[in-house]
Amino acid sequence: MRQGRKKTTLKDVANAVGVHVSTVSRALDERTRHMITAEVADKIIKVSRELDYSPNAAAYSLRTNRTRLIGVFIPDITNPIFPPIIRGIEDTLGRRNYIAIVVNTEGTATRESALINTLRGREIDGMIVASVERQDKAIDELVEAGIAVVTVNRRVDSPHVSSVVNDEHDGMRRVLAHLMSLGHSRIVGIAGPQGLSTGKIRHEAFQHFRKALGLSSDPGTVVFADRFNENEGERCMERLLARDVDFTAIVASNDRLAIGALTALKRHGIDCPSDVSVTGFNDMYLSDRIDPPLTTVRIQQYEVGLRAAEALLRHIDAGEEIAEPVHDVLPVELVVRQSTAPLAKT
């Protein structure tokens, strides 16, 4: 009977390089690599790859009380903005030999709570949560239990939970300034769910800058979506049309809402952008391929995931020394495409 190849051990790597096992261990751990010379560390890393060495996860967990598993909570796996965020998380975690376990909460607090309990049973080292609501009991319980948590793309109201988000205020400012530069003054909004930080902050910024720019901030010119998806964008657009509001531009709180609004406008024979300009937020994948290509606010999807993972690892490294919460806000940019145009002269 053919035997499988013997698994390479730390001792095998140490013997091949001619150093002590503890030196190999330090070289293969980013946190302790600085304790040895760069030349020796590089040699050990090279030999470990040549010998196809991989750490023994079970032994590592027993020795350090860590599993190197991180839970990543996504509210809607079909939303195109999340794959780049996940990629940023995984690339960062991978450099430290951590593994991401990605779960889909379907945007419900009940499912999020159940998944948190499941992953806590696996003794994961920390959690990165993109599905969080502004008031999130499950997240509060994690923090109280001393589990490392960072929210990404959204945040909770509590300042004690670290977050990495995008500059929602500046995004809305850029959108409204752009529409005004095109001659639009009758601007309506499709706001996101107010239980989510992205929905609330973008709506508040929309109202603030409408007023600051001398535009009407009449509450009747805004409709609130229950979820950030195309169906809700379509429903909200129908509500606005039914109100018989006079408008020439629509600001949607994300790209999916904007796409739904475009569908409703086409059904009513309203052309974008010759009749009405439409903007989104996020610059999700393929937003430049829809008809018409969408003017939107570009967020740093990959970078926000990378920063969230870095923040989580800092919390984990701090151990019992509680790390101060971090609240990173990443800059955004306006991407102008064909869904916005100068106000038609009448």
Image: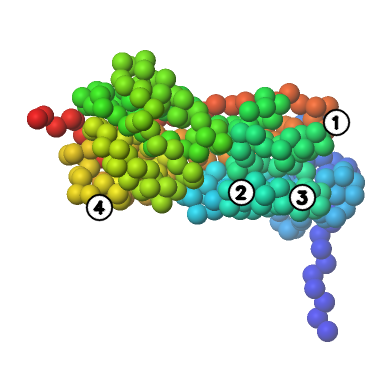
Foreground tag (2 vs 3): 2
- Using a 10 Å C-alpha cutoff, classify the residue at mark 3 as few (fewer than 14 neighbours), some (14 to 19) or many (20 or more): some
Q: Which residue is denoted by mark 4 in the rendering? A: 267
**Which secondary structure, mark 3?**
helix
Q: Which residue is denoted by mark 3 in the rendering? A: 117
Give the image location of residue 124, x and y in percent: 77, 47
**Which tag, 2 or 3, sits closer to the chain's start?**
2
Residue 99 appears in the rendering? no
Identify the amino acid type marked 3. Answer: Asn
Q: Which residue is denoted by mark 2 in the rendering? A: 108
Task: Say which residue appears at 52% left-offset and 35% top-offset.
Answer: 194
**Which tag, 4 or 3, sits closer to the chain's start?**
3
Task: Say which residue appears at 87% left-offset and 45% top-offset.
Answer: 65
Q: Are marks 4 and 1 in contact (CB under 8 Å)?
A: no
**Which tag, 4 or 2, sits closer to the chain's start?**
2
Identify the amino acid type marked 1. Answer: Glu
Identify the amino acid type marked 4. Answer: Arg
Q: Are marks 2 and 1 in contact (CB under 8 Å)?
A: no
Query: CA–CA distance between discs 4 and 3?
Result: 45 Å
Between residue 71 and residue 138, name the one nearer to us. 138
Foreground tag (4 vs 3): 4
